[in-house]
Image (tube, helix red, strand yellow):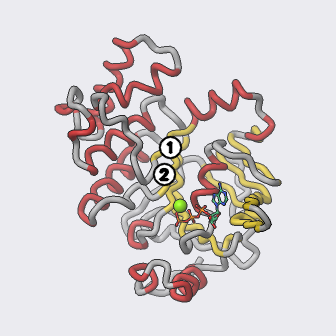
Amino acid sequence: MLTQANPGVVVLGDSGDAITTNSEAIVRVESLRKTFRSGEQEITPLDGVSFSVDRGEMISVVGPSGTGKSTLLHLLAALDTPTSGTVYFERNSLFSLGETDLSDYRNRSVGFVWQRHHILPDFTASENVAMPLLIRGIALAQALRTAGEWLGEVGLGHRAGQRSGELSGGEQQRVAIARALVNGPALLLADEPTGDLDERNADTIFELIQRLHESHHLTSILATHNQPLARRADRMLVLVHGKLAAGEQSFFAGAAATAARPAVAAATIPGERG
Ligand SMILES: Nc1ncnc2c1ncn2[C@@H]1O[C@H](COP(=O)(O)OP(=O)(O)OP(=O)(O)O)[C@@H](O)[C@H]1O
Ligand SMILES: [Mg+2]
């Protein structure tokens, strides 16, 4: 669980192999490989990635741009299929599930927050949050009531009836977080949830995610380029060249080499090693 001083940040060993084999694991990623083909070119953003995540953990995924963070999250959400390897959720291999079970998994077991919130601007905040409940077949009045409660949880109870397009970026991200959690998922996946926000809003949204992670006993996996926020997770996974890397050093060396993210490359890390 999260601790103030953040002593729990662990970086993977050289093997990049499974980091816990604990029976508490809610997610287990096994030899995950994903290749994209574009004309003659083949790109393999994930080249045999294995790790597991215990129930209740908050994990950050970092790595240079284009290194496969979004690809990994999409596979964890079963929004895409791997070239080989698999993801177990509560002991079920996602890619062996039938369409109905997969839809249930996406709708009920996982909440996904994107960098760009994908909120429908012409619908009210509560209508946006109610969508996953309506998809699940909950009646409109009940769905809107539950959505209103969730908007209260993210500090937007008073804006429930407002057209979403009129909300600020930070407020729209709060709506997106409420929408991700309204069905009570066990797993929260977030792909650069603070990437479009200024520093102050990024902090506020991260703190909101941390608070909800704890109060709703979530397991959370967040991809981020924001190093200070990444280090506040229980554990940090570093993706480089399709593998889980030996440590933060290689990530920042890689970032410096590609100059992909100068702010990250310039950051210093005071000697944290797993
Ligand atoms: N549908 C696709 N078809 C072809 N290539 C793809 C596809 N999706 C991703 N890629 C490629 O896979 C690689 C990894 O992409 P991904 O989006 O996972 O990186 P990322 O780590 O999330 O990067 P960023 O930090 O910029 O968000 C990139 O080279 C990307 O161009
Ligand atoms: Mg990405």
Q: In this picture, is 18 found above or below 126?
A: below
In the drawing, does residue 144 fall left or right of residue 251?
A: left
Count every numbered label the image shows and give the total: 2
Residue most extreme to the front: 39
Q: Viewer-proximal residue, 44 or 25?
A: 44
Of the numbered discs 2 and 1, the one sitting upstream in the chain is: 1
Q: Viewer-proximal residue, 39 or 35?
A: 39
Q: Amino acid at mark 2?
A: Ala
Crowding near pointer 1: few (<14 within 10 Å), some, many (20+)?
A: many
User: What residue lies at 70% left-to-right and 60% top-to-bottom?
Assistant: 51
Using the rendered view, name the quadrant where residue 195 is placed: bottom left
User: What residue lies at 20% left-to-right and 31% top-to-bottom?
Assistant: 162
Q: Position of residue 173 (x, y in %)?
A: 33, 46
Q: Position of residue 62 (x, y in %)?
A: 53, 69
Q: Viewer-proximal residue, 133 or 93?
A: 133
Residue most extreme to the left: 158
Q: Amino acid at mark 1?
A: Phe
- On the image, numbered disc 1 is attached to which residue? 112
In the drawing, does residue 240 fall left or right of residue 141?
A: right
- On the image, numbered disc 2 is attached to which residue? 190
CA gap, disc 2 to disc 1? 6 Å
User: What residue lies at 80% left-to-right and 54% top-to-bottom?
Assistant: 83
Q: Position of residue 231 (x, y in %)?
A: 45, 70
User: What residue lies at 45% left-to-right and 38% top-to-bottom?
Assistant: 180
Q: Viewer-proximal residue, 96 or 235?
A: 96
